Image: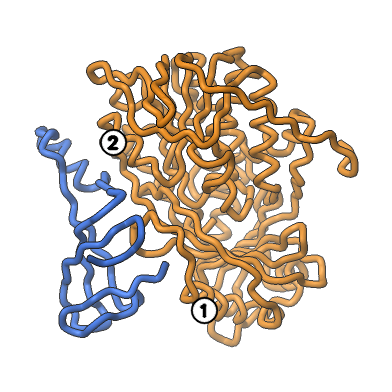
Chain colours: A orange, B blue
Amino acid sequence: MNEFWEAKVTLQWAELGSSYDVVIIGGGGHGLATAYNLAVKHGITNVAVIEKDYIGGGNSGRNTTVIRSNYGKPEPVRFYQRSLDLYRQLEDETDRWIMHDERGLLWLAHTEAGRRQERSRSSMNLAFGAETHFVEPEEIAKLAPGINLDAGGEFPITGGSLHVGGATARHDRVNWAFAEGAMRAGVTIVQGVKVEGLILDGDRVVGVKTNTGDVAAGTVVSAVGGHATTIATMANVRLPIRTHPLQAFVTNHYEQTWDAIVASNDLGFYISQTARGEMLGGSHIDPQPSYSRRSDHHFINEISRRIVALFPFMGNLRVLRQWTGICDMSPDYTPIMGFTSAPGFLITTGWGTWGFKAIPAGGEAMAQLIASGETPELIAPFSIDRFANDRTLADRGSSGTH
Amino acid sequence: MALRIPCPHCGTRAIDEWVYGEIPIVPDAITDADARDVDRAYFHNNAEGVVREAWFHLYGCRRWVTVERDSRTDTFL
């Protein structure tokens, strides 16, 4: 599509009614994409999305916009690859420019063990449809100009993997594209309405209580980011989730174009350049479970030291702003989607630090599940039952930071 | 936010010295023994409000400390 001309995004707001087939709690990417798919792909338009703040104002507006599928287990690789493919066609599908930029993602190894791991991950990714190649340090120097290959002797680069499909997109535009498409198809989206409780009939969830009145619902979906446990508790559903803050920052403008997204697990950070030319950095979650979105100097201090060891040019940049989101961390670093022990109550959670890349496929799968009443094969491994059935998908190594 | 945790033995210290320890509370409503094990292993109360938790002062006095913290504001009580 033409990136220099674009019609204004028109969001048609409506009043919240008293009864819907589907009520989605949370107007972030996953909630909006689910509503969009329900209305546009399945013709289910009697749908309401209830957002307590403003759409895309939670983690959908606080993430670092990395899209990738180079995960460490077959099931997530398939799922995220589907999402990566959907992102590629999202601009044509919604007729909205989401600033999708496929630039490749470089994942660094600093030890012999890390080198072997990147080699095996590349083969595994290729086998399950994600394009990832092992790269030697010489090639890394070309892909990431300015990199200090021996990192001061402390963290020498021994190799890495190049995930060709790695991309970024503008998060607000993704949210607006899904919201606009859903609204056009007849979905009601409300902002500033807070869900204060669920209406139960025995175990079954039959509606939501909000600060503006009760709403009856055939199905209630929790697409909440951060406060997932609080909502699930209202349905008497236990979640294997702990909520941790995650911080990120951007610097002032860097004068050179910097294409690749670069991640290092051993050093615990990743960086990329935004469309404005700022260098963006992120790291691990904070150690304590918390709902606080306060940012701090400690994080900047810690991460700068590690980033500058690898990228000395970053030492000349200044931190322009930093922010914090609160992430729903699942024990195996893999999402939790689908039915729960409460009939009529569905969840899409456990999006931890990796939710943005999953928005199109997550919305598609949740809508299929609601429309058909059956769990699509793609997300069946992500069922909450996996913990009791000893089918966890431990994948911290490839989802720990972004 | 980077916590500063009050240690009754060493004074208030930065979070880098500490290891987090959740105090798991399995709800009484879960009665099956296997289900209680699963809950204890994987599930969390993850309360939004005052939480009681344990911290191990690894790079300090090497003792477990039990504290109460408001998980909405990260302030210790």
Residues under numbered marks 2 and 1 in contact, where contact means CB atoms less than 8 Å apart = no
Q: CA distance from mark 2 to mark 1?
A: 37 Å
Q: Quadrant of the N terminus of chain A?
A: top right
User: What residue is pinned by disc 2?
Assistant: A233
Residue drawn at 63 percent across, 51 percent down: A65
- Residue A303 image position (x, y, % from top left): 53, 74
For the image, the number of numbered tags is: 2
Say which element carries label 1: helix
Residue drawn at 49 percent across, 66 percent down: A295
**Crowd tier of the residue under label 1, counting other residues whose Cα lies within 10 Å: few below 14, some 14–19, many 20 or above:** few
Figure quadrant of residue A119: bottom right
Q: Is residue A381 visible?
A: no
Residue drawn at 48 percent across, 45 percent down: A73
Residue drawn at 23 percent across, 83 percent down: B11
On screen, residue A134 versus residue A255, left or right, reads: left
Q: Output the chain of dot 1.
A: A
- Of pointers 2 and 1, the one earlier in the residue sequence: 2
Q: Quadrant of the C terminus of chain A?
A: bottom right
Choose between A335 and A178: the one closer to the eye.
A178
- Residue A174 image position (x, y, % from top left): 67, 40
Figure quadrant of residue A315: bottom right
- A105 is higher (above) or lower (below) than A313: above
Q: Is residue A208 visible?
A: yes
User: What residue is pinned by disc 1?
Assistant: A301
Q: Amino acid at mark 1?
A: Asn
Say which element carries label 2: helix
- A172 is higher (above) or lower (below) than A401: above
